[in-house]
């Protein structure tokens, strides 16, 4: 939930990353060799919210609590970063989703 630095997602070959992009600079920090910015659909938003809820429960983070209390205002400020291979599959087959752990 904090600021990101240059070379964001360098070497990213799997998974997904959600970044609170309050200042609109995540794309500038992104190392685009292997990863890109993807859309946050309803399922991705649900995963993001669950992650923040778990973070708030584990850490009592004031920022996480503030985000959750004003979700409709904060949710659009997040960007989703994923490997380009995943983004390409999602673009070609919109019903394909990242595998979720059991």
Image (cartoon, rainbow, N blue to C red):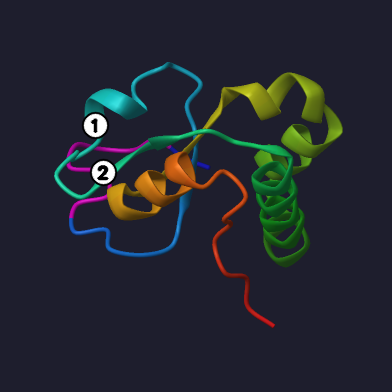
Mark seen at residue 8: 2
Percent x, y of residue 62: 71, 42
Q: Magenta stretch? A: 3-10
Nearer the observer, 67 or 50: 50
Q: Which mark is residue 47?
A: none
Q: Measuring 19% from the left and 37% from the top, which residue is drawn there?
A: 6
Front residue (pair 28, 35): 35
Neighbor class of circle 2 (other Cα within 10 Å; few <14, some 14-19, many 20+) is: some
- Local secondary structure at mark 1: helix
Q: Residue at x 43, y 62 (%)?
A: 15
Judge whether residue 62 is colored magenta: no
Q: Residue 94's image quarter?
A: top right
Quote the CA–CA distance across marks 2 and 1. 6 Å
Mark closer to the chain start, 2 or 1:
2
The correct choice, above or below, for 40 with respect to 98 in the image is above
Secondary structure mainly formed by the magenta segment:
loop
User: Which residue lies most toward the left here?
Assistant: 33
Contact flag, marks 2 and 1 (Cβ < 8 Å): yes
| x and y percentages locating residue 47 in the rendered image | 69, 54
Residue lying farthest to the bottom in this orientation: 102
- Residue 90 point in image, percent of width and height: 48, 46
- Residue 4 in magenta stretch: yes
Task: Locate the C terminus by quadrant.
Answer: bottom right
Residue marked by disc 1: 29
Considering every residue shown, the one lying at the far front of the view is: 92
Residue under the point 39% across and 45% down: 87
Give the side of residue 75 with respect to residue 24, left or right. Answer: right
């Amino acid at each position: 939930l904090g600021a990101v630095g240059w070379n964001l997602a360098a070497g990213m070959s799997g998974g997904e990353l959600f970044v609170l992009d309050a200042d609109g600079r995540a794309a500038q920090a992104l190392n685009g060799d292997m990863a890109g910015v993807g859309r946050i659909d309803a399922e991705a938003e649900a995963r993001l919210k669950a992650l923040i809820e778990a973070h708030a429960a584990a850490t009592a983070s004031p920022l996480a609590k503030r985000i959750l209390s004003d979700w409709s205002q904060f949710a659009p400020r997040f960007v989703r970063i994923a490997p380009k291979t995943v983004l390409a599959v999602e673009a070609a087959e919109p019903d394909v989703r990242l595998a979720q752990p059991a």
